[in-house]
Image (cartoon, rainbow, N blue to C red):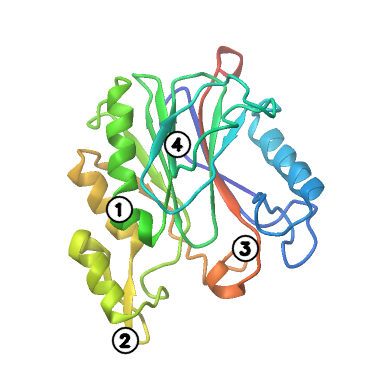
Amino acid sequence: MITNVGLGAGVGAAFTARAGGVSRPPYDSLNLGGAVGDDAASVRDNRGRAAGALGIAAGRTVWMRQVHGADVAFVTGEPGGSGSPGDGLPPVDAIVTTEPGLALAVLVADCAPVLLADPEAGVVGAAHSGRPGTAAGVVPALVAKMRERGADPARMRAAIGPAACGDCYEVPDAMRAEVAGVVPEAYATTRKGTPGLDIRAGITGQLAGAGVTDVWLDPRCTIESGDLFSFRREGVTGRFAGYVWIKGAEDE
């Protein structure tokens, strides 16, 4: 259910998968997305199960309203209108915190979940970077926001989670040209010989351009792996998540 990632001492990071939850088809079973048509009680149960498996305290995860943009927000554990941290945030596709014990979550089902950390500065961030967000530069914007909080790109560690791979992610030729015009590394040709995009390669190039070279890539393709949710493969489906957080003293 969980793939843990090493982003440095004092930092927790992980990607969930599909199994281990209570949602019924077509969201079976560990769907963490609250805006895909699944039963709300099942989503709450699934989020509690994931947090428990990761050792994250109840009610200490920030969820974004993702819109495929490049806006970034700094978040704290102060509860919003619903009593949850981060509630009331405007729509954003990346978030940053310096607060120990506060987990940042990014939901995906073909887009790339990107986790960043500077353990020395005590700054972590998460981004939702699909085709539009990658072209718009959400990950470089996340690096810049983390720098505002004292992070150094030369110290940052990044993890890019499962996403649609360049062999599978087929797009019209004009769309490939448009994205590759701003992110050249994303240019790809699928195994069928058709125009494609390699979003993770594009993000890796963006990170390098921002000074972040310590990058871990999850090799799994969401379209190919039945263990993960994929919108392109299934249409109506759930969402898995990437989590990153600064561990509190009690977690050390």
Q: Which residue is mark 1?
A: 136
* Disc 3 crowd, CA 10 A, few/some/many (<14, 14-19, 20+): some
N-terminal of the pair, mark 2 or mark 3, is 2
The CA distance from mark 2 to mark 1 is: 26 Å
Tell me which numbered mark, 4 or 1, is placed earlier along the sequence: 4
Q: Which residue is mark 3?
A: 227
Residue 184, located in which quarter of the rendered image? bottom left
- Labels 1 and 3: the sequence-earlier one: 1
Q: Residue at x 64, y 51 (%)?
A: 33
Q: Nearer the viewer, mark 3 or mark 4?
A: 3
First in sequence: mark 2 vs mark 1: 1
Residue at 76% x, 51% y is: 21
| Amino acid of disc 3 | Asp
* Inter-mark Cα distance, 3 to 4: 22 Å
Rounded to the nearest whole Å, what is the CA distance between mark 1 and mark 3? Answer: 29 Å
Are the two marked residues, 2 and 1, in contact with CB atoms closer than 8 angstroms?
A: no
Choose mark 1 or mark 3, whichever is in front.
1
Return the residue at label 2: 193
Q: CA distance from mark 2 to mark 3?
A: 26 Å
Query: Residue 6 shows which numbered tag?
Result: 4
Coordinates of residue 166 in the picture (x, y in percent): 36, 70
State whether residue 91 appears in this view: yes
Q: Secondary structure at mark 4?
A: loop
Q: Residue at x 71, y 59 (%)?
A: 37
Q: CA distance from mark 2 to mark 4?
A: 36 Å
**Residue type, numbered disc 1:** Ala
